[in-house]
Amino acid sequence: MAKIKTAYFCQNCGVESAKWVGKCPSCGEWNTYVEEVVQKDEGKRGTWQSDRSPAKTSKPKRLREINYEEQSRLVTGDAELDRVLGTGIVPGSLVLIGGEPGIGKSTLMLQIALMLNGTKILYVSGEESESQIKMRSERMKYQSDQCYILSETNTQQIFQQIAVLEPDLLVIDSIQTLHSQYVASAAGSVSQVRECTAELMKFAKQTGTPVFLIGHITKDGSIAGPKILEHMVDTVLQFEGDRHLSYRILRTSKNRFGSTNELGIYEMHVDGLKAVTNPSEILLTQREEQLTGVAIGAMLEGNRPLLIEIQSLVSPATYGTPQRSSTGHDAKRLSMLLAVLEKRGGMRLGQQDVFLNIAGGLRVDDPGLDLAVCASIISSHEESPIDPGTCFAGEVGLGGEIRAVNRIESRIAEASKMGFKRIILSRYAIRGLDRSKFPIEIVPIGKLEEMYRLLFL
């Protein structure tokens, strides 16, 4: 009887150790090492082969001798997903999609599979039965004769069906449910996730077939499994949003074939996810009366300009220590802006509770929203509403100066398209700007005091 081989793996970063240790030497986390069975059949491991990709021996080449031809991408027809991926799906790419339970990951991938008519797609589900997937597909208004469903979790059985079907696109739902017979540990463990991902990556690169992996997330929002999983794949997408609200946000945190700053917005309906073509319209609250503490900021997410509503509430601190709370905005940057308003603007905010909210559930990090945040806080503090036809675009420095932001023309054009009458920005941003192109009043300022006198005096 062969001796069972075991090893210890860090559940946070995936580092292997021969013995248990309290603190991981790689990521520094405590009590994350778990013992797993790692007995493997090295002679059979990674034996994926196909007539489409005969085995070949790699030899080193000079860089100038390598012939490069840009591969044509597979356009899905979903404008939001294509934008996030970088104009389409790259052949042979490995894409990981993570998100909370019930957020719509499986719905999104099944919808894409049904939309791609003329492309042979294999949808492998380890969590749902074939009848459950059929029930979901009937709610969608898409029909496809090239979408094949397989309910299986063993990777060797999956590869046997792939060799027979030879799909053009493979979807795995989810990577944590798969298990390989070459690893003896349970499905979802560090060694199983790493082994199954390695087999799928080898298949994708050898055959040029794009593979989508759906992944679970932990309670802190990161992809479940070893950190090496995110390093192995080509693209990592995060599907975010509140399950109790209808809007979903698809953003990329890693992309070897495009930008990592793009953003896709969907709206969940009974018959599937619908792409939101004008996100500025949904991010602006329809108000019947003017409210204090509300300002509109022009921001950029990748190449897409957005207008978002910033809401602030400033009130006297009930308890000894004033609260500083922000939703969707960096708390440290909020503290910096409050310090600038106190030091440079003379506002007494030391004994005030300040609450900041980004409407629509977005998380923003564009410094071009600083001016809108300051205007919102001043409006709430002074109990004076801002004209609803005014928006802002500018970065605030520690000296109280308004700094220029990039791509100001795109921000002005988006504000004009949404019907705003005036945009307040830095005077340094209008150098070389042709104001006659925009049917909107452009108001340049250089200091926070100028904005205060303009809006609140």
Image (cartoon, rainbow, N blue to C red):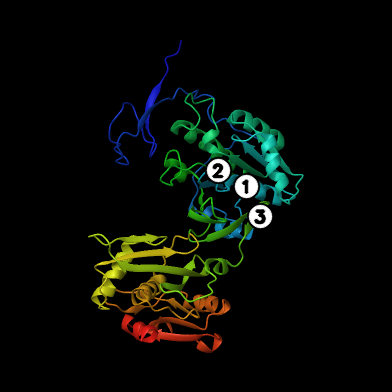
Location of residue 55 by image quarter: top right
Is any part of residue 263 visible from this angle? yes
Q: SS for tag 1? A: helix
Q: Label 2 near label 1: C-beta < 8 Å? A: no
Identify which residue is drawn at 68% across, 35% down: 130
- Label of residue 76 in the image: 3
Quadrant location of the C terminus? Answer: bottom left
Image mark count: 3
| Mark 2 lies on residue | 214
- Measured from the top left, where is residue 8 in percent x and y? 36, 28
| Mark 1 lies on residue | 107
User: Badge 1, how many Cα within 10 Å: few under 14, some, many 20+?
Assistant: some
**Front-most of 284 and 19?**
284
> What residue type is disc 1 on?
Thr
Look at discs 3 and 2 and give the one toward the viewer: 2
Q: SS for tag 3? A: loop
- Measured from the top left, where is residue 398 in percent x and y? 27, 73
Examine the rendered structure and indicate whether residue 431 appears above or below residue 301.
below
Classify residue 243 as left or right of residue 123.
left
- Measured from the top left, where is residue 57 in percent x and y? 55, 38
Location of residue 436 by image quarter: bottom right
Identify which residue is drawn at 55% across, 69% down: 280
Q: Label 3 near label 1: C-beta < 8 Å? A: no
Examine the rendered structure and indicate whether residue 393 appears above or below residue 137.
below
Classify residue 128 as left or right of residue 17.
right
